[in-house]
Image (cartoon, rainbow, N blue to C red):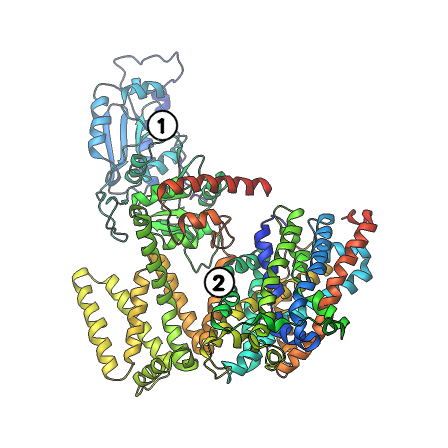
Amino acid sequence: MREPYLSWPEAAWLIVQYSVCANYLFMPQLLYSISGRLSWAVPIIAIPPAIAGAWAVYYLHTRFPGERLGQFLPRLVGRPLSIAIAGLYILFWIGGSVTNVTVFAHYLSDTILQFTPVTVLVATNMLIIVLVSLSGLKTLVRVNDALLFIVAPFLLFTWLWPFVASRLDFSNLLPVELSELTSDPLRVAMAAVTMYHGYLILLIAGPALNPSGLTALTAGALGTLLSVFVFLAFITMPLLAFGWPYANLLTYPAASFLEVVAPKTGLFPIRRFDFVLTVFFRYIMIVAAMSYFYSAAQTMSDLVSPAAKRMHPWFVVTLGIVLVMLSTLFKGIRTVMEFTSMWVILGASVAVMAPILALVAFLRPDAGHGR
Amino acid sequence: MRRPIKIIPRPIEAEARKAQPPDLSPEFREPPVDAPLRFDDVEEQVSLISMALGSPSDLAVRRMSDGVVCLFLSPLVDQGAVRHSLVEPLSRAGWLELQEKSQAARVLPVAGLSEARSLEAAVDRVAEGETALIVHGRPTPYTLDLRGRVARQVSPPISEPSVRGPRDSLTERLSDNLGLVRQRIRNRNLRVRELTVGLDTRTRVAVCYFEGKASPEIANAVIQRLSAIDTPAVLDSSYLMTYLAQRTWLLFPPAVATERADRVCAAIIQGRVVVICDNSPFALVIPIQMVTLFQANEDHYSLAIHSFLLRTVRIIGWLAATMAPGLYIGIASFNPGILPAHAAMTIAAARQGVPYPPVIEVLIMDIALEMLAEASVRLPTYVGGAATVVGGLILGTAAAQAKLVSNVMIIVVALTAIGSFAIPDYQNQLSWRTVKYLFTLSSAFLGIIGLTTAGLIILVYVCSVDVLGVPFMSPIAPWRWTAMVKDVAMRVPDPLAVELGKQQREEEAEGTADA
């Protein structure tokens, strides 16, 4: 990394979008199915592990300030294990990218563009993602910065508008029955750990932080806390508006949330307001998909050639084509949503892996030398 | 690479034997009064320079006195200055008093007197418009800058008119333009570095910046990039644009081309670097950001609230100019549901009987609009007006009546045209007119989702561009909050701007220190 250019507010904003990504589409329904009415508590329960994860990434960043995951991992855990661990991260990131791009393509194909083949929509999104990756992380950060002026007003709107447009009843959150959380504790834990995974981007963007060091922790913690508000809105608003179990009756991704936000004109999903929301959702999706794709590509490139200044353009293009081909495996939005259950497991694994790596780094103080 | 000129003075051995060559040593003795003086060395230099220049018909050779000849290209030299600075002083002095430069400087009241290093250098200088003064006994001529040529007077700006503000604009003469700058910035920290670019045209280019405000790295980079240009011709400042940006394919101009002297000075004061090119009335301001292209100097002559209104109007105009046709296609072909039912019905009714899909309709009208814009620029003013009336009113109305295009389409095209005219910078206008087709075609492909896809592609492109290390999308991306508050969507009043400017410089200094 030749010049640090990523300030902590920019990094925090990147983490917000990276966390929210496709989660807004599937996380509410996933949580409703495993923790019922008490789903609203999960975004709050998920804060401590996320902060711990952010701290772990910060520690790794301070130990290896100028290096990305794929560069420091071989020295930390050895070459064979580094391939396995980096492979896990790459799988998670590729999965995230494919999920984001594909779920949205199916969503569009089901609602707005019913006569356009899904593959065309996936390829269109992938074109933008590949373009960003070819330009580099700096461009990704700038695109993310520029989208603040589109996405942040939208997120604020989704937070405030339901208070004006819908009848929100806070008694719908009650009674608090802890048994709902403990009925399937493993899945709840995995969802909670995966929810705020945005700080993981610092494993890739860390060397660009200006200044390095504590900035990583500030950005990680702030980005995570800002994401809490977003997830609270997506998960809690339908519960407030419809109560339990009605919030879970609309099984289409984000359907219940759209119902809360959109004016009551019926005709879901082809509705004017949904259209506008969809366009805004797409911006979040695209930034997240870009970040996932870039992280995966960069880590692969670093594993193969740690000293390379840039990823090889043909490698990026080929990876993009592979992902478009992978997306054809998803035959419908249901398949994508089923895949997300698996992706959540991957997310939980890589989120847990970060503190483990930090612990290894702590126990092996000599691992930082020798580059 | 400069074209080599090989000039080797011919040895005149027979003559040398007859008359002693002039002795330039301090012990030089004057020849006897009765000995006939020969000035063959002078004649030889005249003949060599003339031959090197191809013996042009406009080469003036004036024999001022015995052993002193001046030589210049008459269209490039101020005849009055020749008379005043050469003819009159030399009528009182001979070749003996011009042997040393210090002597010559006393005799000739000219600031730009220098000794050419060689005859080749003298030829180059004569070609550039200087005057060569060949003196008997000197191996190489003196050169004097007595340049003068026909030039346009300072006049109001044509391409950037304004209601308020100064009315003087740059001309084709570099010295006049530098004068306009110096008149406004009367400060010792104003730096002007002159270079010669263009292998064949040898055009003079001045790089102006304010020491202490402009980044030294950027100023040096501009000078280095200009020095490295190896193009044969630089006939206008626009030739330098791609060399300065160091990107071959550009969608947006990397520099603002302005003919307004006040805008040039404002840019210098803001810490930018200005490149003024001889023979061009447009100076280049570099580096710039996207937001700069939407600012007019007049914004600073209006109240802050008024400039906010004007900038808002420009942004709306820009959105209309680039997106209106795509939005029309998206709504008419893919997403009529985005509009209220009666509005969607109105569009559908207007399109009844139109034989093409909306995208063809848009392309026909857009291309007609481009032709009209091009014709109105190229035609003489009095014909241009008539062409606009024929194209705009008659053709548009007739096309709608003949049901070749819908009435709504005419409104969309008019909106596009008006919107593009609201974009202040002409180069920027052209860029967005080009981008409009990407939006149109993407919209024809995927409706409004296609429109947003094209928007994202353009966003990625502009975010990836750096001009001399300055992000093109700054201060929006990356965020520079102080600069954004100070002078982006709105311009804060001047006293506040000064304070914010200080804060901005501190932030930038901290950022640099951190980096």
Residue B27 to residue A340: above or below: above
Horizontal and vertical percent position of residue B142: 34, 28
In the picture, measured across the screen, residue B1 lies left or right of residue A321, that is left
Horizontal and vertical percent position of residue B47: 31, 35
**Residue placed furthest toward the bottom:** B353
Residue B114's disc is 1
Q: Is residue B100 visible?
A: no
Out of B323 and B100, give the one closest to the viewer: B323
* The quarter of the displayed image where residue A336 is located: bottom right
Residue occupied by mark 2:
A153
Out of B504 and A300, give the one closest to the viewer: B504
Mark 2: amino acid: Pro
Residue B257 to residue B220: above or below: below
> Which chain does the numbered disc 2 sit on?
A
Q: Badge 1, how many Cα within 10 Å: few under 14, some, many 20+?
A: some
Out of B119 and A22, give the one closest to the viewer: A22
Mark 1: amino acid: Ser
Residue A356 to residue B45: above or below: below
Residue at left offset 35%, top offset 50%: B257
Residue A140's disc is none
* The quarter of the displayed image where residue A305 is located: bottom right
SS category of the residue bearing label 2: helix
* Distance from Cα at disc 2 to Cα at disc 1: 66 Å
SS category of the residue bearing label 1: strand
* The quarter of the displayed image where residue B179 is located: top left
Horizontal and vertical percent position of residue A118: 56, 81
User: Which of label 2 and label 1 is nearer to you?
Assistant: 2
